[in-house]
Image (cartoon, grey):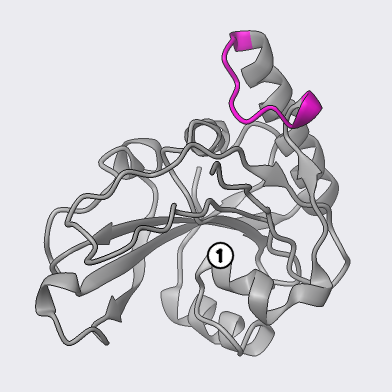
Amino acid sequence: MSSHFDGDRLSALWQQQFPKVPPIAHELRAAYSDRWVRFHSLRGSKRYPETEDEYAIVLHRYNTLLDELFEGTDVYVVTVAWSWEPDGAELPPRRPEVHPEGSRWTTLAHEDDPDPELHSYTHLYADRRPWRPGAADEILREVADDVLSGVIITDSGLSRAPSLRRRRRRHCGKPRRTQPTARRSPRLAAPQPGRPVKTECRTDH
């Protein structure tokens, strides 16, 4: 069950803890490169779980680390969507299905390109909930399937912020409105007390 979500408080905490970057998971690595380590989610660097046994391994590893970090505390769970218009249809459509508790935290506009057709908007949704193992399994399973990216789970003081992210494959020329993405496997990052913790995802070439 989610607790009351205060978006202004979360924004102030983020600015205090991570002033170099907005709350976008992949930007944390570049801005705080000295503050992260990582674990593979499956043996042999396998990219995706294919059986229920492998899903169980992935979720167990996620929950083991998160429980070490957050046992007995509240956490913020942040999921990400994007759209081509400020109030347009958001992708991925699964996000609200697996994170119905999420309230709109903020929207980041990407309007630097002179071509308006290439403007896009990143929407961040968050909720605050008591941590327990399994509390975010629906979300974590979608991350493992490369459906959701940029997920952040952090304690209520933002002293530790494990994130799950993926990289999009680079394309030459003008980007299209719908772009294919490579399948990547999330690697779960290990904690460094008082520092952000990130997940590194390797891109297929």
Is 79 located above or below residue 57 in the figure?
A: below
| Magenta region includes residue 46 | yes
Q: Main secondary structure of the magenta part?
A: loop
Is residue 72 visible to us here?
no
Q: Label 1 is placed on what type of residue?
A: Ala
User: Residue 60's quadrant in the figure?
Assistant: top right
Judging by the rendered image, the residue that carries numbered circle 1 is 25
**Point 63% across, 72% down: residue:** 28
Asked whether, in this view, residue 42 is left or right of residue 89, the answer is: right
Percent of width and height locating residue 69:
81, 53
Where the C terminus falls, by quadrant?
top right
Q: Position of residue 145 (x, y in %)?
A: 49, 31
Residue segment shown in magenta: 43-52
Drawn side of residue 110 relative to residue 31, left or right: left
Q: Residue at x 76, y 38 (%)?
A: 40
- The crowding category of the residue bearing disc 1, from other C-alpha atoms within 10 Å (few below 14, some 14 to 19, many at least 20), is many
Q: Residue at the location (56% across, 33% down)?
A: 144
Q: Nearer the viewer, residue 62 or 28?
A: 28
Tell me where residue 36 sits by quadrant.
Answer: bottom right
Task: Find residue 79 and report its horizontal and vertical position in percent.
Answer: 44, 54
The image shows residue 185 at horizontal and vertical percentages of 60, 37
Residue closer to the observer: 137 or 43? 43
- Residues 15 and 199: in front is 199
Residue under the point 62% across and 31% down: 47
- The answer to whether residue 21 is visible is yes
Q: Is residue 96 above or below residue 196?
A: above
Secondary-structure class at tag 1: helix
